[in-house]
Image: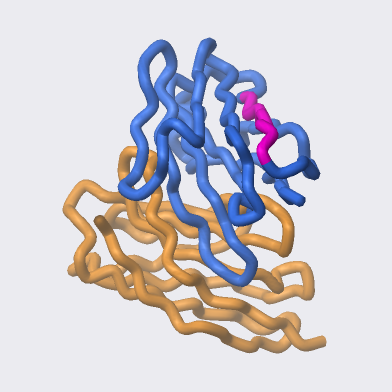
Chain colours: A blue, B orange
Amino acid sequence: GAVVSQHPSWVICKSGTSVKIECRSLDFQATTMFWYRQFPKQSLMLMATSNEGSKATYEQGVEKDKFLINHASLTLSTLTVTSAHPEDSSFYICSARDFRDRAYGYTFGSGTRLTVV
Amino acid sequence: DAKTTQPNSMESNEEEPVHLPCNHSTISGTDYIHWYRQLPSQGPEYVIHGLTSNVNNRMASLAIAEDRKSSTLILHRATLRDAAVYYCVGGSQGNLIFGKGTKLSVKP
């Protein structure tokens, strides 16, 4: 199946700073990628849909100015958490799909554990 | 949105089959039914997906009810490595909406 690489796997930052998380599709192009957030003991929550060459689509309740998404190439989407606060601490996960292989579903990155102190 | 309902937890014995149920009565006619599983502090792993017909792959089988309002993920012989949270997810455009999932425990 396809591989989605996410970096970093964990990050600790100070309150008020910004953090960038990268999501790369390896060996395939992804015009669309998805960003999820997962709090401890909870399920994944879709935050936004990242579209190559155009603006991201955010789910209701997700602040677009706080969670900046850039999808500048067919293999890379980035999520920047701006002015991070402790309540932004969470597990962030991206996903994409290689549509050349219809027998396979969506591939998720390994996730980024963000801790804001 | 294809809202899904699954039991919170299930237990299985090693090397026995496991049937994980999922209700998705609001699924649209074009939404695929996906199954993913997740280990702690890892991203979800794709297991299987289908639309109407039953599906088999090297990991599992997916049995979809004729009315598509429910489905069952079948692990033919559970191993300790199959212990995870299993999510039944509906969607067709990638904006998968995850429910709470079923935590599967496998006893040796």
Q: Is residue B107 visible?
A: yes
Furthest residue to the front? A16
Q: Can I make out residue A91 in this image?
A: no
User: Residue A22: where, in percent of width, then height?
Assistant: 66, 27
Residue A48: horizontal and vertical position, in percent? 42, 38
Q: Quadrant of the N terminus of chain B?
A: bottom left
Q: Position of residue B98 (x, y in %)?
A: 43, 59
Residues shaded magenta: A16-24
Q: Which image quarter holds the C terminus of chain B?
A: bottom right
Q: Residue at x 70, y 62 (%)?
A: B39
Question: Is residue A66 positioned above or below A110 on the image?
Answer: above
The residue at 60%/44% (across/down) is A93
In magenta segment, residue B8? no
Image coordinates of residue B76 in percent, x first then y, are 61, 73
User: On the picture, is A12 further left or further right than B56?
Assistant: right
Secondary structure character of the magenta stretch overall = strand
Q: Is residue B44 above or below residue B19?
A: above
Q: Would residue B95 be found to the left or right of residue B76 on screen? A: left
Q: Residue at x 75, y 83 (%)?
A: B14
The residue shown at (17%, 52%) is B29
Instruction: Please tell me how many numbered marks the rendered image carries.
Output: 0
Nearer-the-camera pick, A115 or B58 = A115
Magenta span includes A21 = yes
Q: Nearer the viewer, residue A37 or A2?
A: A37
Depth check: A26 or B80 in front?
A: A26
